[in-house]
Amino acid sequence: MSSISGPVVVLLMVLQWAGRGLPSPVRPICDPRVLDRFIMEARDTETALTGEQALEVQSGMSLFGQALGAVRESVSRVAVQILIDNNKSNIHSLGQVLRSLHIQDLPLPPAPAVGDLVTRKVSSLSELLHVHTNFLRGKVRLLLTNAPACQQNST
């Protein structure tokens, strides 16, 4: 029995000695440089995302303006034409708001080929206006609330 415990003791001593020679496990979050890098990458991503958001909003406003213009031509009721004109005017006003907030007009990408369309097809004016409302509630609101000029100081 003592002969079996001898090799076990030697093995344990070797493992303990080998363990001392290895550096201790690195705790990367304790290194401020690691956290600084994470912060820098998050800022870069945020900056890129803001540019993408602005491009999405501008592209969307352009598409909605075109769609409303095309729909207006097919509507015969004057009251509905006036409502469509108001929506087109609001799109124009939003463009001015974005320019005043220094969200620059970005060059819109070329129109995609017919097979590459990622726009949603609608079958009625009501559905178009519903999509437009959701666009304003979602993408436009997000872009505007993240604009530096729209940030409210919480002091």
Image: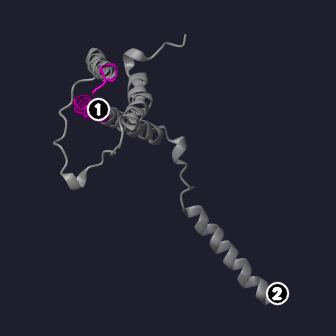
* Mark carried by residue 2: 2
Can you name the residue that lies furthest to the top here? 155
Could you say which disc has been placed on residue 127 in the image? none
Image: 95 above or below 55: above
Q: Main secondary structure of the magenta part?
A: helix
For numbered disc 1, what is the local secondary structure?
Answer: helix
Question: Could you tell me the amino acid type at mark 2?
Answer: Ser
Judge whether residue 111 is colored magenta. Answer: no
**What's the colour scheme?**
one colour
Determine the image quadrant of residue 21. Answer: bottom right
Query: Which element type, helix, strand or loop, lies under badge 2?
Result: helix
Quadrant of residue 145 in the image? top left
Left or right placement of residue 111 versus residue 37 in this view: left
Which of these two is toward me, 83 or 43?
83
Image quarter of the C terminus = top right
| Most foreground residue, 151 or 89 | 89
The amino acid marked with disc number 1 is Phe
Disc 2/disc 1 C-alpha distance (Å): 87 Å
Query: Which quarter of the figure has residue 148?
Result: top left
Residue drawn at point x = 28 percent, y = 22 percent: 88
Chain-order first, disc 2 or disc 1: 2
Q: Which residue is mark 1?
A: 64
Provide the residue span drawn in magenta. Answer: 56-80
